Structures are given as C-alpha cells and as structure tokens.
Amino acid sequence: MSTIFSKIVSGDIPAYKVAESNDFLAFLDINPLAKGHVLVIPKRETDYIFDIDDDHYMALWVFAKIVAQGIKAVIPCARVGVSVIGLEVAHAHIHLVPIKAISDLNFQKEKLSFTAAEFAEIAEGIKDSIIKITQRD
C-alpha cells in the first residue's frame, strides 16, 4: 500500500527536501514540533523500521546522523533529539527534532506553523549545511 511518504519519494507530493541519496530521503515535517524538525525515511517502502535488513538499517542511521549534524549546525539547539514511533504513517521514519529540553520531544504538544517561504528557507539552510559537512569528509 502506497503511503504519503512513498508519494513524496515518487514526486507525486512535494516536500521540503534537505538531503537525498539513492536509498534515503530527508525532508521537513510539515507539522513540526520545532523549527528544523526533519523526517528521515528509506525510499523503499517498509512499514516497521525493525523489518529493514541490517545493511539498509545501519545505512539509514548513518544518513540520519549526517542530517542531524546539518540541523545542529544551523538551528539553535542543545541537541537533535531522535524518535522512532511508527504509528502515524505506515512507512518507517526517524524524527530528528532540535531540542533544548526533554519536553521538546513531546509529540502531544501543539505543532508549529510556518509559511511556505519559511519552510523553504529552513530547508535550504539545512541542505546547505549538509552539503558543507559532506564536502569536508
């Protein structure tokens, strides 16, 4: 069954992409807990993150690490928090959320709202930061 994330991967639904590889995609959450809240997904549709084969699973986390470093470089925060819930969309995904306190990772709190221009600016800043990080390595 095709999910909203699969439609983003195929280009049927637009997204504010911050990083992409052959196997993975990272884009801004449109209902963010914080400015710079990013979702990292495997392009291959898999419902449950722990059903991903070991090599792909490890590569997903390496990709997420690079994205988190890009977020941390441009969004003021103490850490980039990580959450894998997997109930809201039947497509494995990792939430990367800039946080200053544990309570910032509470998914029951009210979500933030940004304009399309603000989302685009946030995405561009994170994307540029990721490019700089990957060019250093």
Image (tube, rainbow, N blue to C red):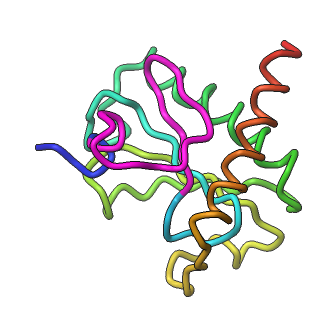
Across and down, in percent, residue 98 comes to 74, 60
6 and 80: which is toward the camera = 6
Q: Is residue 59 left or right of residue 47?
A: right
The answer to if 16 sits in the magenta stretch is yes
Q: Residue furthest bottom?
A: 110
Judge left or right: residue 117 versus residue 50: right
Rendered position, 53 above or below 36: above
Give the image location of residue 103, x and y in percent.
70, 79
At a point 50% along the width and 83% down the height, the residue shown is 108
Above/below status of 131 relative to 103:
above
Q: Tell me the quarter of the picture where residue 119 sits.
A: bottom right
Viewer-proximal residue among 65 and 52: 65
Q: Is residue 50 magenta?
A: no
Rendered view: 137 above or below 75: above
Q: Residue furthest left?
A: 1
Residue nearer the viewer, 99 or 116: 116
Residue placed at 59% from the left, 52% from the top?
Answer: 38
Q: What is the number of callouts on the image?
A: 0
User: Is the N terminus in the top left, top right, bottom left or bottom right quadrant?
Assistant: top left
- Please state the horizontal and vertical placement of residue 118, each as a whole percent of the image: 68, 65
Left or right: 99 as drawn, with respect to 8:
right
The percent position of residue 5, horizontal first and vertical second, equals 33, 46
Give residue 68's quadrant in the image: top right
Which residue lies at the image location 37% right of the left edge and 40% below the top edge?
49
Residue appearing at x 46%, y 49% in the figure: 15
If the image is split into quadrants, where does the C terminus sit?
top right
Q: Which residues are magenta?
A: 7-28
